[in-house]
């Protein structure tokens, strides 16, 4: 189990893998993969290296919390800071009303104080 409370499985890096492609393949937010592998050299992944992939089914969200958009936020930065994926944003907000204007509110899953 990693520090965020997720069970992990080990994944062996294959030729051409990036953390982004792995996150998409396993539907795990990139931020969680990064936090589960703090010592991984993300700019120099080598075939045969092993990384921990958090199992998203082992720690469900404990609720939904509002996130007030700050000046300079992007959808990517909000997802990274919250440890969530695009599906989480779309499932908890009206896609036609998602605005990233400072002061607007997005609703994001909360995994507790550790995340």
Image: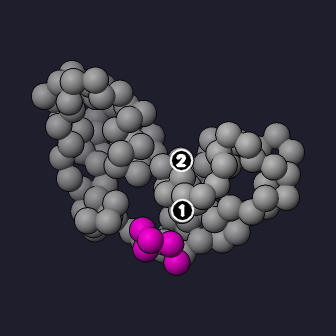
Q: Residue furthest bottom?
A: 1
Whether residue 29 is visible: no
Q: Relative to residue 12, is residue 8 depicted above or below? A: below
Task: Report the disc number at residue 30.
Answer: 2
Q: Quadrant of the C terminus?
A: bottom left
Q: Position of residue 29 (x, y in %)?
A: 50, 50
Q: Nearer the viewer, residue 41 or 72?
A: 41
Marks 2 and 1: which is nearer the front?
Answer: 1
Numbered marks: total: 2
Q: Position of residue 64 (x, y in %)?
A: 24, 56
Question: Which segment did they paint magenta?
Answer: 1-5
Observer-nearest of 64 and 68: 68
Which residue does the image show at 66% across and 49% down from the upper left?
A: 41
Residue underneath mark 1: 36
Residue 4 among magenta residues: yes
Q: Secondary structure at mark 1?
A: helix
SS label for mark 2 = helix
* Side of 26 where 107 appears, left or right: left
Which is more N-terminal, label 1 or label 2? 2
Magenta stretch, main secondary structure, is loop
- State left or right for residue 75 relative to residue 49: left
Rendered image coloring scheme: one colour
| Circle 1 residues within 10 Å: few <14, some 14–19, many ≥20 | many
């Amino acid at each position: 189990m990693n520090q965020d409370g997720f069970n992990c499985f080990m994944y062996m890096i294959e030729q051409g893998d990036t953390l982004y492609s792995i996150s998409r393949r396993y539907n795990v937010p990139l931020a969680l993969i990064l936090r589960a592998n703090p010592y991984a050299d993300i700019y120099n992944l080598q075939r045969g290296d092993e990384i921990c992939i958090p199992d998203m089914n082992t720690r469900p969200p404990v609720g939904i919390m509002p996130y007030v958009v700050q000046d300079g936020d992007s959808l990517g930065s909000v997802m990274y800071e919250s440890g969530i994926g695009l599906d989480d944003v779309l499932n908890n907000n009206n896609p036609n009303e998602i605005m990233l204007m400072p002061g607007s509110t997005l609703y994001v899953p909360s995994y507790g104080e550790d995340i």
